[in-house]
Image (tube, rainbow, N blue to C red):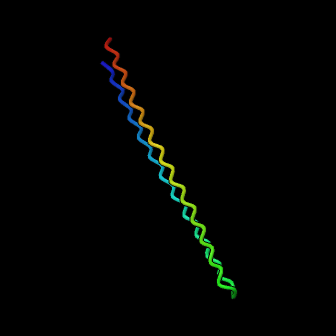
Amino acid sequence: VSMNISTNVSMNVSTNVITNVSMNVSMNISINVHTNVSMNISTNVSMKINTN
């Protein structure tokens, strides 16, 4: 009897926050906020049971 159980769980979370604030003397304020959140969750479960 041979039993092989392999479980792979990988989780990738990347968060990018870019904030640009520029102020000029003529009182112009521009604020740019870019937020990127990407989440990848992959789960692989493979089970092999061999009975001889």
Q: Can you say whether 17 is above or below 44 in the image?
A: below
Figure quadrant of residue 8: top left
Residue 12, compared with residue 19, is above or below; it is above
Residue 20 rendering spot, x and y as whole percentages = 62, 72
- Quadrant occupied by the N terminus: top left
11, 2: nearer the viewer: 11
Position of 8 with respect to 34 (left or right) is left
Residue name at image x 37 percent, y 21 percent? 48
**Extreme-top residue of the structure:** 52
Image check: 8 left or right of 26? left
Please tell me which residue is depicted at 65% across the width and 84% down the height of the picture: 27
Q: Nearer the viewer, residue 29 or 12?
A: 29
- In front: 37, or 21? 21
- Relative to 40, residue 3 above or below: above
Instruction: Name the image quarter holding the C terminus.
Output: top left
* Rendering coords of residue 11 (x, y %): 44, 46
Name the outermost residue toward the bottom: 25
Of residue 43 and residue 29, the one placed in the foreground of this image is: 29
Residue 34 x %, y % = 58, 61
Residue at the (45%, 38%) spot, across then down: 42
Count of labels in the image: 0
Q: Position of residue 13 (x, y in %)?
A: 47, 52
